[in-house]
Amino acid sequence: MSRVHAEDRGLAAVARVREVRETDSRIGLQQVLAEQAGLTGRLTSLTDTLGSAVLVPVCAPGDLLAQRTALANVGVLAAETRSALATTEVVADEARVRWGADRARLAAVELLLERRATGRRTERARREAREADDLAAQAWAREAAR
């Protein structure tokens, strides 16, 4: 919005606030989606680690205990990551809803501003047409009077 009509200054201010809110909520959504993607990658990596783990069947009891402990730790990390991922899914859903609402509010204000501008253009065109008709009628009357 480069030029704002004097009658629309208040509504333009509302539009600027709505635009900032929409931008903030979009950035928040992008951040949570990036975090969700990172957690998804981490969970995939941990799951792959668990799936490809090979326990050596013949080894010292200390080595077997170390292998099982390491795998148990990977399992705990996978469970924690799965829980964090579930949380980010809820947050992402809420962020998506918030961004959609902010975007809809901004669109409504922008539509109202556009309708007002269209109404002013239409009224100006009607005025100009009336003036052109008046000028044409005056010119016709002068010609007829000659």
Image (cartoon, rainbow, N blue to C red):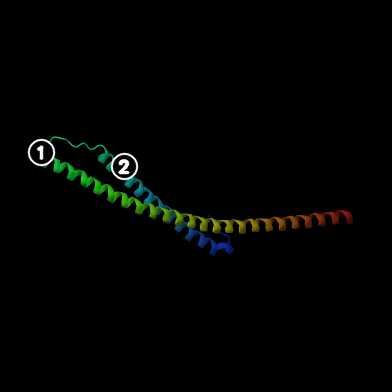
Q: Circle 2 is placed at which residue position?
A: 44
Q: What amino acid type is highlighted by mark number 2?
A: Thr
The outermost residue toward the front is: 57
Viewer-proximal residue, 2 or 101? 101
Q: Which mark is residue 60?
A: 1
Q: Which mark is residue 104?
A: none
Q: Position of residue 104 (x, y in %)?
A: 52, 56
Name the residue at 49% across, 57% down: 101
Q: Position of residue 97 (x, y in %)?
A: 46, 55
Q: What amino acid type is highlighted by mark number 1?
A: Ala
Viewer-proximal residue, 75 or 22? 75
Would you say 90 lies left or right of 127 here?
left
SS under mark 1: loop
Would you say 117 lies left or right of 58 here?
right
- CB under 8 Å between callouts 2 and 1? no
SS under mark 2: helix
Between disc 2 and disc 1, the foreground one is 1
Where does the C terminus fall, quadrant-wise? bottom right
Viewer-proximal residue, 39 or 22? 39
**Label 2 Cα crowd, 10 Å radius (few <14 / some 14-19 / many 20+):** some
**Among numbered discs 2 and 1, the one appearing first in the sequence:** 2
**Label 1 Cα crowd, 10 Å radius (few <14 / some 14-19 / many 20+):** few
Q: Quadrant of residue 117?
A: bottom right
Decide if residue 3 is in sight here: no
| Up/down of 14 relative to 68, above or below | below
Q: Position of residue 120 (x, y in %)?
A: 65, 58
Q: Quadrant of residue 20?
A: bottom left
Would you say 64 lies left or right of 115 here?
left
Q: Position of residue 35 (x, y in %)?
A: 34, 49
Name the residue at 86% across, 53% down: 143
Name the residue at 28% across, 49% down: 79
CA gap between label 2 and label 1 equals: 31 Å
